[in-house]
């Protein structure tokens, strides 16, 4: 029996090039964001990396690349 399922979600968390989660700044410039310290994201939870859609094979590559970049950046933080 075949049932419907979710194949891939386009997420919604905004990240920068280092995989740091961004929050929208409500006051000031429209569309401005700032990072949330010590919070990183990669993979299906992120949004905007592929725009409105993605090519079929890009999801795994995104997880590996952004995950690696975010991990390397997180490793530089002194707690």
Image (cartoon, rainbow, N blue to C red):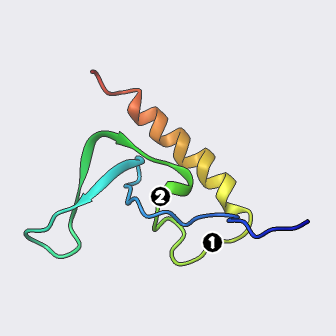
Q: Residue at x 38, y 55 (%)?
A: 15
Q: Residue at x 69, y 71 (%)?
A: 55
How far from the left and from the top, in percent, is residue 11? 49, 63
- The image shows residue 22, relative to residue 56, as above or below, that is above
How far from the left and from the top, in percent, is residue 27? 8, 68
Is 7 placed left or right of 75 in the picture?
right
Q: Quadrant of residue 67?
A: top right
How far from the left and from the top, in percent, is residue 18? 40, 47
Q: Earlier in the sequence, mark 2 or mark 1?
A: 2
Q: Residue at x 25, y 46 (%)?
A: 36
Kindly give the residue lying farthest to the right in the view shown: 1
Kindly give the residue lying farthest to the front in the view shown: 1
Is 15 placed left or right of 63 in the picture?
left
Q: Quadrant of residue 7?
A: bottom right
Disc ID at residue 46: 2
Q: Mark 1: few, some, or many residues within 10 Å (few <14, many ≥20)?
A: few
**Quadrant of image for the C terminus:** top left
**Quadrant of image for the N terminus:** bottom right
Is 76 placed left or right of 60 in the picture?
left
Q: Mark 2: few, some, or many residues within 10 Å (few <14, many ≥20)?
A: many
Q: CA distance from mark 2 to mark 1?
A: 13 Å
Tag count = 2
* Residue at mark 1: 54
**Foreground residue among 13 and 78:** 13
- The image shows residue 62, relative to residue 25, as above or below, that is above
How far from the left and from the top, in percent, is residue 3? 81, 68
Disc ID at residue 45: none
- The image shows residue 11, relative to residue 36, as above or below, that is below
SS state under label 2: loop
SS state under label 1: loop
Kindly give the residue lying farthest to the left in the view shown: 27
């Amino acid at each position: 029996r075949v049932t419907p399922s979710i194949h891939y979600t386009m997420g919604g968390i905004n990240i920068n090039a280092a995989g740091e989660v961004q929050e929208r700044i409500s006051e000031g410039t429209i569309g401005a964001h700032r990072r949330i310290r010590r919070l990183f994201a990669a993979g299906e939870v992120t949004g905007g990396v592929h725009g409105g859609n993605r090519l079929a094979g890009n999801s795994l590559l995104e997880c590996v690349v952004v995950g690696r970049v975010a991990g390397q950046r997180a490793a530089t933080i002194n707690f």
